[in-house]
Image: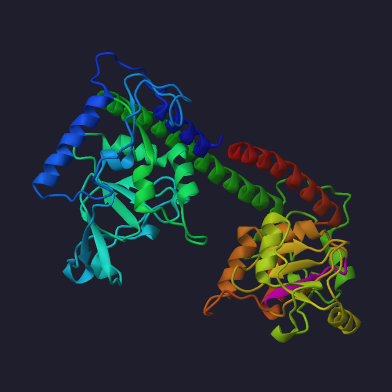
Amino acid sequence: MDTKKLRQKILDLAIHGKLVPQDPNDEPASVLLERICAEKERLVKEGKIKKSKAAKTSDTPHYENLQVGKANVPFEIPSSWAWTTLGEISNYGDNKNVIVENIEFTDWVLELEDIEKDSGIIVQCVTKSERKINGTRHKFCTGEILYSKLRTYLNKVLIAPSDGYCTTEIMPFGTFGILSNDYVCHVLRSTFFLDYTIQCGYGVKMPRLSTTDACNGMIPLPPFSEQERIVCEIKRWFALIDQIEQGKVDLQATIKQAKSKILDLAIHGKLVPQNPNDEPASELLKRINPAAEITCDNGQYGKVPNGWAICTIGNLFDVVSAKRVLKSDWTNKGIPFYRAREIVQLHREGVADKDLFITEQLFEELKDKFDIPKAGDIMLSAVGSIGYTYIVNEKDEFYYKDASVLCLKNINKLNSLYFSMIFETSFVKEQMYDNSKGTTVDTITIEKLRKYFVPLPPLAEQHRIVAKIEELFSSLDNIQKALEV
């Protein structure tokens, strides 16, 4: 379920007059517009507001009881409603500017980065003393609408929960105490109004909405009582959607925990049954490395199942790094050149951004002198986001950054997927992070990696474990995909 689209559908129904029923006893919206007009004229006469673009009444008539096509209105609305503009019903653009020096250190200063896109949730509340600011800020009051005119597609619109000061990219305004600011806020969040602002925005990289265009934005206005009913109904529906979203988050966390538990069972020999006819891991290890120390017990891991062994990565794989390639040898075409970040992308998404390359000539020279990755080898991110793996396939042709990426050469034809999965278990992760402590950036060196302990099942059981994990993970992934629809 796409909850973002569901929220927009509810807003769409609301502004079309289809979310709550109309009440013939409600005072029509036209009366509200007359009251706003009178209030604005009074404030202008008293010198409290200026007759500016944001304050003056538009020459465009109110569109009451009109059918789409008979007037320049976006869609049909109920007979008790009226078409108006944001400039007619609000003081948008009539802002009180305050220089930073006149703001108290304990005052709330709101920046765009503090607001979550689409939801309008305030993710952090910061005072002047907690952030470095200069220039001018808009003053806003509790209950006013705060509207981001910069990159309106981010839909950062909310009702001010308390007094404060905001960046001039945010426009605070109200509706003279006559309309429901919450209702107007919902209109501004709707796809209908959002599409209008995107069409009007000026500037390519950081598009803004001009004050004139904002004031000319059309608003479908219901009677005040219906505005309140709409706001209550939207709140009810959004609360239900919040529960759905939280349920999705909880289920996703449960799926993640389930995968971790499956891997834990796998490396402890509890996911698939042991077969006494399998060649023991000790015999496999003797063939791979006759000098390897074979143990069936480990203080951190515990006792392994019958037929298993505990050994180190260095006993099983030839761990290597690449010949250093200078930045001056990087190009924008040729053979892909992978760093740790590309290995992380390959692990998570199956594809990587191909931003860096080396020439085919250099690649051939390196291939002649060094053992490049081959099918079945395991690439490991070793700096920053450590421990992410990628198994090389037959069609792969790439080179990689020294130290940033390590290669586990699978010359002994072990099950690469089993050992790739090993790196996602808490048993190996604890060794990784314990051994990377004390460095500025998490780092895995060849020497450290070779010393990691891993549980080694018989080769036949490695294959059975991988098949079972893939089966179980496939079911969990299907659930995950269903949550994203």
- Which one is in front, 232 or 324? 232
Which residue sits furthest left?
A: 46
Q: Nearer the viewer, residue 177 or 383?
A: 177
Q: How is the image coloured?
A: rainbow
Horizontal relation, residue 48 to residue 96: left or right = left
Query: Quadrant of residue 287 in the image?
Result: bottom right
Q: Give the residue at x 66% y 63%.
A: 344
> Along the line of sight, which residue is nearer the eye, 465 or 470?
470
Quarter of the image for residue 300 reads bottom right
Say whether residue 152 is visible. Answer: yes
Q: Residue at x 42, y 26 (%)?
A: 16
Q: Where residue 328 sits in the image (x, y, percent)?
A: 72, 86
Residue at horizontal 50%, vertical 33%?
6
The answer to whether any part of residue 122 appears in the image is no
Give x and y (percent) for residue 267.
Answer: 70, 55
Vertical position of residue 30 compared to residue 329: above or below: above
Q: Is residue 409 magenta?
A: yes
Residue 126 screen position, x and y as percent: 29, 62
Give the extent of the magenta segment: 404-412
Q: Is residue 349 above or below residue 363?
A: above
Residue at the front extreme, as displayed: 59
* Magenta segment includes 306: no
